[in-house]
């Protein structure tokens, strides 16, 4: 396993300040705890450009910190078509993200985007956008992300084995 090129994972949402940086932080910690940090490369981005260069939303930072995860150092960037060639997994948060990235994928090829929650066991298939809602939305985002992260880690372990 040690000679292998790292498996690369890109989380995608709309703004890259709430859901996808939360997913990056949660999954990074799960990978670190599993001793696989050298084998899995993780990044996140947004389909939109409004928040490029910004730190995660303060509510996302606070809720992650309450679970022992520091995402304060992350900075938003926008998805680029070259990401389709650079990442092995492109995991989007909702159907709008899926549609937006699929349009780019149809023209460019590369890794096909998937709904991140397809790796989870819950009845949800989208991580709802918490931006215009209250604190409980950010808790729900983290619950969904934690569960899907476990499934994703198992899928990547199989690929690394
Ligand atoms: P995210 O949430 O896609 O999870 O980062 C949002 C952040 C910003 C906006 C929408 C959703 N916005 O409209 O600015």
Image (tube, rainbow, N blue to C red):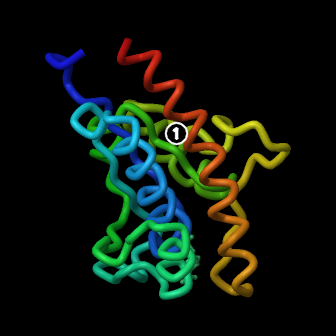
Q: Nearer the viewer, residue 89 or 40?
A: 40
Residue linked to disc 1: 113
Q: Nearer the viewer, residue 6 or 125?
A: 6
Residue 42: horizontal and vertical position, in percent?
33, 47
Residue 18: tell me if it is visible.
yes
Q: Give the residue displayed 55% in from the left and 85% down from the top.
A: 59
User: Against 157, is 59 above or below?
Assistant: below
Q: Give the residue displayed 40% in from the left and 47% down from the top.
A: 10
Q: Residue furthest top?
A: 161
Quadrant for the N terminus in the image: top left
Residue 32: horizontal and vertical position, in percent?
34, 45
**Count of numbered marks:** 1
| Quarter of image, res 148 | top right
Q: Give the residue displayed 32% in from the left and 55% down from the top.
A: 80
Residue 137: horizontal and vertical position, in percent?
73, 75
| Quarter of image, res 86 | top left
Q: Nearer the viewer, residue 160 or 54?
A: 160
Ligand 1's quadrant is: bottom right
Residue 99: tell me if it is visible.
no
| Quarter of image, res 40 | top left
Mark 1: few/some/many CA within 10 Å (<14, 14-19, 20+): many
Q: Is residue 131 left or right of residue 44?
A: right
Q: Secondary structure at mark 1?
A: loop
Q: Is residue 12 left or right of residue 96?
A: left
User: Against 13, is 145 above or below?
Assistant: above
């Amino acid at each position: 396993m040690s000679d292998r090129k790292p498996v690369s994972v890109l989380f995608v949402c709309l703004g890259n300040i709430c859901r996808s940086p939360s997913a990056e932080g949660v999954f990074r910690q799960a990978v670190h705890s599993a001793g696989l940090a050298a084998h899995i490369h993780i990044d996140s981005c947004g389909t939109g450009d409004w928040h490029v260069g910004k730190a995660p939303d303060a509510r996302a930072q606070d809720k992650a910190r309450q679970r022992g995860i520091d995402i304060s150092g992350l900075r938003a960037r926008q998805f680029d078509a070259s990401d389709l060639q650079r990442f092995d997994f492109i995991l989007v948060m909702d159907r709008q993200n899926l549609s937006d990235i699929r349009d780019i994928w149809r023209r460019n090829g590369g890794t096909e985007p998937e709904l991140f929650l397809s790796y989870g066991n819950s009845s949800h298939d989208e991580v709802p956008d918490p931006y215009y809602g209250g604190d409980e939305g950010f808790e729900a985002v983290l619950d969904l992300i934690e569960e899907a992260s476990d499934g994703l880690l198992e899928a990547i372990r199989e690929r690394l084995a």
